[in-house]
Every structure is written in C-alpha cells, then in structure tokens.
Image (tube, rainbow, N blue to C red):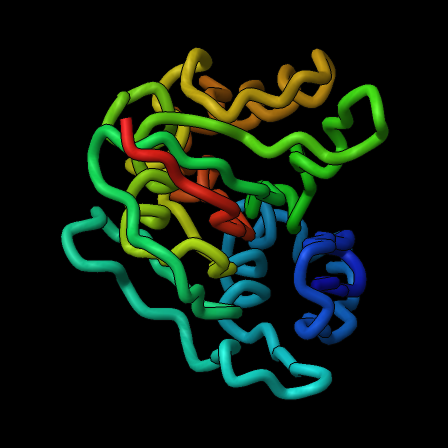
Amino acid sequence: MILKCFAPLQCFHVPHHPTVRLVHPNVTSPTPSSLITTRRGALSTTLISTTLFTLTPPSKSATITEFSELPNSGGVKALDLRLGDGQVPADGDQVSVHYYGRLAAKQGWRFDSTYDHKDENGEPIPFVFVIGSGKVISGIETAVKSMKVGGVRRVVIPPSQGYLSTSQEPIPPNFFDRQRLFTTIFNPTRLANGEGSTLGTLVFDIELVSLRHQ
C-alpha cells in the first residue's frame, strides 16, 4: 500500500498492500502575521481535522470515515484507513508495527518512520514492543490494542498520552531529529506561556504487521 500526501506532510509507504493511497490537499504556508497562531497549534489542528482521503482502487478491507475518540484513551483520536482481518492484540502480546510519526506543532514535521530503518538487505525494520510494557507512549499502545493485524490507522495523540519523558519509545535514532523533537515538546519558555496543550500533539500512521503471544 502507498500512502501519498502533499506538502507540508511527506510520504508514508506501506509496501505490503498496494490498494490504498492517501491524498492530502495542498496547504498554503502561513503568512508572517499568522505564525503565532500557527505555533499555538490552531493551523495544525485544522490540517489534521480537514484532511481528505481517496482510495484507488476501492477495497472491501478499507474504510474511510471520520476521526473518532477511542474509548478510555485520554483523548486519542483515530481514523481507520484500512481494517485488518487478523487477531487483536492483548496485554503481554509482542507486536510488530510500521509507523510514520509527525509532530503537529511543526506543521506535520516528520520526526521518524520505520521505513527509514533498514536491515542489511535494505528492507524496512518494523518497530517491536510488548503491549502493556509501559515503555511505549500510551497513545500508541491504546491505538494498537484495538486494531486487527493487517490494519492501518491514523491517530492523533494529545500531549497527555504522548511523550512524557525522553526515554519513552519510539525514539528517533537520528540525534538531531531526537533533539529537535524533545526540544519542541519540552520547551520551558513555551510551556510557561501556556502552550503545553499543543506542543506535544503527535500524528502517527500505524500499520499492525503481526503479533505474537508471549
């Protein structure tokens, strides 16, 4: 599957299923007079909520509706881009996922993607973690726990369910991307200015590749 998007978001590739393509509308960059509003998250929230999708060709396993808040998630919102047909993970299961992570505060800046992590054969390496381990940001765990293997889901994660420390996974392997991410989220000046509710908002595209019962 190829998920295709236009500026300012970059592309997210899911090579295993060639039936789904995402198309984003072009977004005009803000003028200098609107930068303050943008940095406070108003524009980034609009970009997330008004994104349009098309499927080419249509698939019985794919679904496009609207974002909805996941039950007992602390505010995590999800949009299923494709429904899986496999098992649903539970606490203690080891799952493998591909993801494409963006930071809403920087107008969709991509800070990490599993498709940038390659093995010796040049194949992308999925991210592996155990459900309920507490090592992964809670918004991702919550989203994956209600997915089926083979599904693809876009999730908007509020700061309270995102990075609460710099040791939580997934951590961008590139030092500069990692520094930029955490410097933005934990910026003391902007936090003191009351921007904490927008700085750490994350957008993840997640494909649940497989699971293994431990």
Expressed as whole percent of the image width and height from the top left, the position of residue 112 reads: 66, 33
Instruction: Give me the residue at 51% from left, 40% from top.
Output: 97
Q: Note whether residue 102 is visible.
A: no
Image quadrant where residue 176 sits:
top right
Instruction: Give me the residue at 25% from left, 59% from top.
Output: 70
Image quadrant where residue 51 sits:
bottom right
Task: Judge by depth and name the residue closer to the eye, 21 or 214.
Answer: 214
As drawn, which residue projects farthest toward the left? Answer: 72
Q: Quadrant of the N terminus?
A: bottom right
Instruction: Give me the residue at 41% from left, 36% from top.
Output: 95
Residue 124, above or below 89: above
**Looking at the image, how many numbered discs can be counted on the residues?**
0
Residue 21, above or below 96: below
In the picture, measured across the screen, residue 26 lies left or right of residue 146, that is: right
In the picture, measured across the screen, residue 138 lies left or right of residue 50, that is: left
Residue 146, above or below 68: above
Q: Quadrant of the C terminus?
A: top left
Task: Judge by depth and name the residue closer to the eye, 134 or 36.
Answer: 134
Residue 196, above or below 12: above
Expressed as whole percent of the image width and height from the top left, the position of residue 195 reads: 42, 37
Expressed as whole percent of the image width and height from the top left, the position of residue 76 reads: 32, 52
Task: Judge by depth and name the residue closer to the eye, 25 or 151.
Answer: 151
Q: Note whether residue 65 is visible.
A: yes
Task: Judge by depth and name the residue closer to the eye, 46 or 15.
Answer: 15
As drawn, which residue projects farthest toward the front? Answer: 213
